[in-house]
Image (cartoon, grey):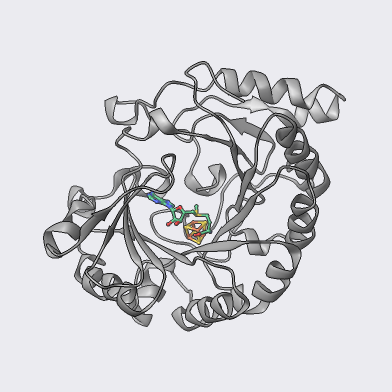
Amino acid sequence: MKDRFERNIEYLRISVTDRCNLRCRYCMPEEGIKDKRTHSDMLSLEEIYEVVKACTNIGINKVRITGGEPLTRKGVSGLIKNISKLDGIKDIAMTTNGLLLKEYAKELKESGLHRVNVSLDTLNEKKYKHITRFGSLKNVLEGLDEAKKVGLLPIKINIVLIGGFNDDEIEDFVKLTIDEDIQVRFIELMPIGQATDWAKENFIPNTTVLDKFKELKPVPRADKSSPAEYYKLPGAKGLVGLINPISHHFCGNCNRIRLTADGKIKPCLNSNQEIDIKKVIKSGGDLEETIRIAIQQKPLRHYLNEGQSIKRDMMRIGG
Ligand code: SAM
Ligand code: SF4
């Protein structure tokens, strides 16, 4: 359906959990999430399915499963299988840290998942352990291989660009696109969650990538609602994407809403507005109507770079 500003809302991002098997320094505190909610505060997989079903009735055709780490939620393949059978669903993707992909890629593909975005901020084992606090790069690389093997394509690798940490690896990441049909996407670090108080030097513009690679040429956007601007090296098989979550230049084309693991609809990632859909489910209310109202409340744009701050961390919103 269209919102008040004539944007066609057709994309639902679902956070299936706020738990994670990593503790990326910019995202999660070392001890994990503090105010642990009880199981009953979270949407069950059946409830998530009911929300998705209602969403398809009002024109949602694209779904992304995220978190926290979605692969730590038991039964996520079953949820994907059920969603894939819904009329109108054209695309099901997942954002994952990739640690468990080797184990689950085949099952996910068979359940109807189309593709994965894998978050990977460094290609160096030691640095990976540092930024994630205890993860193993080897597991992620094996997961990526398995995802390619079973056909979860196109593969997108998301790198949060952190000054003084991985800006020296831009070249290595960009070069991955030469021989492989993958998308390597640099995301600017956002001052939310654990990164709220990070040093100024850690926040660098992703145009640093273009400064380092003058031969990158812009590629026309296939999907106008995508937050990424794409570039290509001459003769390369893959693409390089730049995503600036703060600049609001893509708010005008935004086609998405979010469902949090604790049952809130967020019409905008960068706004504190939330609609309690769990309450509606519990009271047997009209899901479709609630989602329609949420879409009508979607703001024209966010005001993050104008002093507005976000109460929820990324792993609670579903990045
Ligand atoms: N655990 C999964 C993963 O890491 O892909 C999915 C959830 S995670 C919250 C989604 C994405 O948000 C990841 O790519 C992560 O790097 C990104 N993210 C988390 N905190 C961020 C921040 N402060 N600024 C920019 N991106 C952030
Ligand atoms: Fe976990 Fe993803 Fe946050 Fe890292 S970015 S701590 S993998 S939710």
Would you place residue 68 above or below residue 164 in this image? above
Residue 319 appearing in the image = yes
Q: Which residue is at 62% across, 22% downward?
A: 294
Image quadrant for the N terminus? top right
Residue 188 appearing in the image = no
Q: Which residue is at 47% across, 18% downward?
A: 5
Q: Which residue is at 86% across, 24% downward?
A: 283
Left or right, 123 with respect to 48, comes to: left
**Could you say where residue 316 lies in the image, as x and y percent from the top left?**
56, 44
> Which image quadrant for residue 57?
top right
239 or 124, which is in the foreground? 239
Left or right, 168 with respect to 53, comes to: left
**Could you say where residue 45 lies in the image, as x and y percent from the top left?**
79, 49
Would you place residue 250 above or below residue 37 in this image? above
Would you place residue 319 above or below residue 232 in this image? above
Q: Which residue is at 56% across, 51% downward?
A: 33
- Number of labels in the image equals 0
**Could you say where residue 141 lies in the image, as x and y percent from the top left?**
47, 80
**Could you say where residue 127 lies in the image, as x and y percent from the top left?**
33, 75
160 or 224, which is in the foreground? 224
Left or right, 177 with respect to 319, comes to: left
In the image, farthest residue toward the right: 284
> Which image quadrant for residue 218?
bottom left
